[in-house]
Amino acid sequence: MFEEPEWAEAAPVVAGLSPVTSWPRPEAAAKIRGSRHSQLLATLRILEAASLCHQSTSLPGSDSEEEVERKKKCPKKSSFASTSAKVGEKRKECQKLGPPQGNCEDHKTEKKKCRKKALLGSDSAEEEKRKRKCQKEALSNNVDQTGHKSWKCSTTNDSPKPIPRSSSPKPPSTLTRKQWRNRQKNKRRHKNKFRPLQAPDKISSEASKASTEESEMSPAPKADNHKPRAEALRARMAQRLDGARFRYLNEQLYSGPSSAAQRLFQEDPEAFLLYHRGFQSQVKKWPLQPVDRIARDLRQRPSSLVVADFGCGDCRLASSIRNPVHCFDLASLDPRVTVCDMAQVPLEDKSVDVAVFCLSLMGTNIRDFLEEANRVLKPGGLLKVAEVSSRFEDVRTFLRAVTKLGFKVISKDLTNSHFFLFDFEKTGPSQVGPKAQLAGLKLQPCLYKRR
């Protein structure tokens, strides 16, 4: 009855779809199968479906101008959303077509196409994510002046492979010039640290010259250096022991009477030599020795005056003047010395013109020494006393006590920082009895601290 128009066959081709056969309906379609009326209805339905596809989804080449501009402005953000939207629309189209009835091959092919498109969309999303990662890595690794090449990321499915960086020693642009120099110095030091030793044949001539000059300037150390070191150590230890013994002997001399000191040196003759050596080393540090001052004063007097030196030591005073000198001490360091207790000297009464106590008023019986000097001195005789300044608490009380023993003060010299010098003249015998106490004659002991 009805003839099929020409556009009915061309409609599926124009719509870009494969020719689709009509789906058979369950009961009604079986009755009118083979009729042309059913075929027309099927073609109309296909045309309606094609028109709906054109309205809902647009082909890749049919984008509007506004959409193209929008894609150009934000290609990254819109690509993922557009792909997801396309995938959703394609799924909807597949659902509109309805579930398959029977074994329809066309419907299966369409389903496969939809799945492929969905997979393509998901692949494009993964590619976009990979592109973003590549761009971030390129921004982080991109340096302007270092010569290092940035990472290149391919748009393929393979993982991005970094290009090997150039081994240029230039620092990054963030470092200052000073920091760059310091880094180069550290690199050089590190190389020199692990550099292998050169053979003796490869040593330069300059190095050999420098070594010869150094050898000429400073002599090579000897193999047996331990011998002089041991000798120096031994000498140092011996010096410390001598100092300790000197301090002990000095304390014994100032804390006991002269008789106890005499017994000490008689039992140990070397002890006096040790004490005298330590005493001389201490006196050498003074700006002026009192023996020289007394010798200068006696040179201005007649050489016929007889001198008695109480505590002479090494007889330095007798060697400095022309006067006849009687030398007395607890031990002998010279043949001219008479060993005795200074409280009992082997001289006759009133037989001496000058009596000298140069740093020898030691012990606890100073009064006995001064009374013995009064016994041997002639009337009007001279008594010269030189003693360490730190021993005197009150000089006036000392002078007052000496005057009570039969002396008169002639002169005193307190200008020196280390010792005081006094001159007395004998006026007569002692004015006090033997049991009278004279507090001014108790001088402080001269003790040396350990250093």
Image (tube, rainbow, N blue to C red):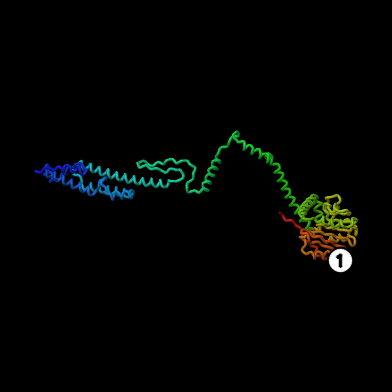
Q: Nearer the viewer, residue 312 or 375?
A: 312
Q: Amino acid at mark 1?
A: Gln
- Element at label 1: loop
Q: Is 162 on the left or on the right of 450, as rendered?
A: left
Q: Residue at x 60, y 33 (%)?
A: 201
Q: Position of residue 139 (x, y in %)?
A: 41, 47
Looking at the rendered image, the quarter that the C terminus falls into is bottom right
Q: Position of residue 343 (x, y in %)?
A: 85, 58
- The residue lying furthest to the top in this view is 201
Looking at the rendered image, the quarter that the N terminus falls into is top left
Q: Nearer the viewer, residue 238 or 217?
A: 217
Q: Nearer the viewer, residue 72 or 225?
A: 72
Residue 366 to residue 125: above or below: below
- The residue lying furthest to the front in this view is 65
The answer, for residue 420, to whether it is visible in the render is yes
Q: Is 200 on the left or on the right of 292, as rendered?
A: left
Q: Is 391 on the left or on the right of 431, as rendered?
A: left
Q: Quadrant of residue 158?
A: top left
Q: Quadrant of residue 34?
A: top left
Q: Position of residue 119 (x, y in %)?
A: 29, 44
Q: Position of residue 4 (x, y in %)?
A: 13, 42
Count of number-bearing discs: 1
The answer, for residue 341, to whether it is visible in the render is no
Q: Residue at x 73, y 46 (%)?
A: 235
Q: Is 211 on the left or on the right of 144, as rendered?
A: right
State the residue position of label 1: 431
Q: Quadrant of residue 217?
A: top right
